[in-house]
Amino acid sequence: MLHAIQNKTDTEKPSPSPVVTVVMAVYNGMPYLTEALESLERQTIGAQRVEIIAVDDGSTDDSGAELDRWTTRLPHLRVIHQENSGGPSGPRNLAIDEARGRYVFIADADDVLGDEALERMVCMAEENTSDVVLGRMAGLGGREVSVLAFKHAARADLYTSDVYRSLNPQKLFRRSLLNDHGIRFPVDLWLGEDQMFCTEAMLAAHVISVVGDYDCYYARRREDGQHLTLRDRSAWQSVEPVKRVMDLIAERVADTDNRRRLLARHFRQIMGKVLLPVAASEKFAGAFRDDTYRYVREVCDTYWEPEMIPHLPALTWLRLYCFLEGRYAQLEVLARFEEHSQDPEIVEDGRVFRPYPFFRDPAAGIPDELFEMTDRLKARHAVTGARWDGGILTVTGHARIDAVSTRDVRTRLQLRSRDGRRVYDLPTRHTATPHLTEEHGKQGRYDFALAGWEAELDPGTAADGGPPEHGVWDLWAVVDIQGLRREVRLGAPAGRPGQWVMPAGRVRAAGGDSVVPYRTKGGKFALDIGGGVRGLAAQGMITDQRWDGEALRWTGAGWIDSVPGEDAEPQLILRSRQSGLQVLVPTRRAHVPRTDLDAAPAHGVPAEVGFTAEVDPLTADGGSPLPPGVWDLHLRLTAPGVTRETRLRAVTGLTTEQLWRVRPLSDAEGHLRLVTPYMTKSGHLAIDSGGIYFTPESQLLLAEGARDPDSRREFVVRGRVGVYGVRPDELRLRVTVGDGPPRTMALALAPPRPGDPAPRAVGPERNADQWPAFTVRVPAGGGPFRRPAVTVRLELTTGGQLFASRPHTAR
């Protein structure tokens, strides 16, 4: 028996189709259900874009009533009540059938969504035409959640990425994918139904994406222990869900290697979730254990291939080997073995063995190959810093090999051409890294205290005493430890907070060749020698800008990717955005305070060339006024062998007074010129020299005008003025009361006070918070029954011209 409650009456028009439908099967979800619904209410995607379908599956607590109460709070919550079906599959399928959203997100009633979860996942799907979107998961209530599957990716490959590690259904699915392929949860399973659903969806998907930069979903470990997965189950119920998923993979995946990759994931599952709990505990001895072994053997006979061994962890393969060989007594010992308790690895003649139970036990007779780790061990490395010491690039870091102590270690850094044909060793010395032993030594099992290194690269001599050829060069570390060798290409950090940043480039004094370290798209450390990929670029900023009499003055700094500052000469240039004409501004070197430079939008690079420049707009163009138009500020830096230009930005510390303020200027012939320095939306500096964007009218702003609430006989007017250098005799307030004659009042400007109203200004910045303010009181007249309208406007007379604000009228 089903009955539904919707948050609309039958006479209302149906709401527009939602973007996403949240599907929620509910059975005895209290008190967690309330928190789950609150998280849906907070979704930033907007209520009109979300539909929620909650199916109460015969709850015996207050869940059904709680859902009904929430229909008055959530605008698009639809509740369906039904008798208990025995599992979540039926309720979820019903909700998917009823869904209208372009996407479906499946949530559990005891979990919580991050506030931006639906917005971020839908945005990812829309941008990449994704069929399935994984949102990064986190744990609640002590629940542990693996994050391996949640590496941020617009398009993740099902077979080469880790997305198949996550087979829970708490994902965003394109509804047409589910309907076109008839993908639903199997109703005859209450365990493993999630994996069937997700596997089928992922195999059918054209695009799988991952939102890995935000915690989208918080999975909870319930304090009452009421999880379906904790129910008692039969041997068949334990094995059958895994077998069905493997049947599906075998049927749908034609590529042999890809099929083996996915099947190996489920052999890991069989070992960890099915065989080990049964083999390790005496309570499962007898018929249950025999039945489990029989069902698992049938799966192995059908799908196991030795080519899957590299896809299994070493201990998992050893345990599975014992099972396949019928060595159940040894399997049961290995099932109870805890890997963290093992002795250190054994290194012999360049081979590494893990001394798991039965290693070289004559009675067991298990081959050494099952204990060998040599080919499984990976090199671990990190670049911890890179800097220019004069003309030498010094790179520091550490490198080691998994599970092998750094005894007898020898690490060399190499400079390799991108084609691999030229290789040069760099001077390298070892450094101490005791912290690696503390962090990764597993309580003293391994000693990584000698993993550190420091290498020097001299661009003039790195290639056997001469300079390397022009091109892209990579840095490699060759690590030799106790007869083992690993070669690893060095990576560079992505610039996350707290990490070092790639240093800027250098120019060799002889010939001016550039050497630029950079981070590749794949995150590797590379050098561009000669500027073929990463030519030297200039950067610069303005730290101060102000009117000095009739001249506009700038102070700033710049550099060419750390070319020594003493070798570079600055030149400020004004370039017309309309005509491309340029005006050279007199420029000279100047000291720029370090505090100002630290506010610059640059990272890890010192600004070595300080400068100051000034220009009179009325004489800037060879004694003539700066032509009307918009002029951008550029800085040209010239050093031996290299010249670069950059468009100048402003540091965030520039005030409104230093930025855009209209300056009315009269030239020698008495013609008024309007000059406004301002900052563009992208943060660059420019000059409006013809009133294109800025006029006095746009800078005369009335914030408010109203009768004084106490006297009612005075009209209080407040406002702001953005015209620079206004004299007291130039600014007036024009007041008209009723039908009377207009009169003008002089104004005095003052710095704004806290609480002064700031009107919304026009122009690129739209910020009048720091403009000079005024407040005046105007006698309004009238009596209690007659209150004439009062009209006010600001007037500015400058250069023989009258400018006025928009009038403001109030009663």
Image: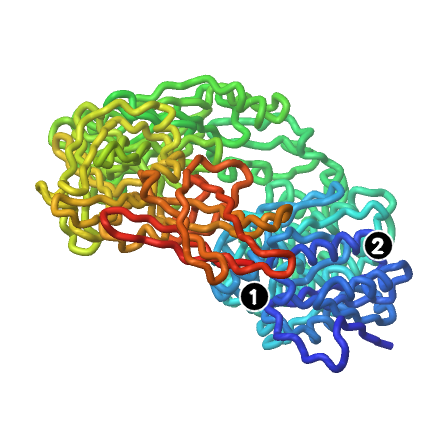
Above or below — where is 406 with respect to 57?
A: above
Question: Closest to the observer: 70 or 316?
Answer: 70
Residue named by callout 1: 203
Can you give x and y, in whole percent of width and height, for residue 663 in the image?
Answer: 28, 43
Closer to the eye: label 1 or 2: 2
N-term mark: 1 or 2 = 2
Q: Residue at x 61, y 55 (%)?
A: 117
Can you give x and y, in whole percent of width and height, for residue 420 in the image?
Answer: 27, 41
Amino acid type shown at disc 2? Met
Q: Decide if residue 470 is in sight here.
A: no
Which quadrant would the N terminus be assigned to in this image? bottom right
State the separation of the CA atoms marked 1 and 2.
Answer: 35 Å
Judged from the image, the secondary structure of the residue bearing numbered disc 1 is helix
Q: Residue at x 53, y 52 (%)?
A: 780
Can you give x and y, in whole percent of width and height, for residue 14 in the image?
Answer: 67, 78
Q: Which mark is residue 30?
A: 2
Is 494 on the left or on the right of 109, as rendered? left
Residue extending farthest bottom:
11
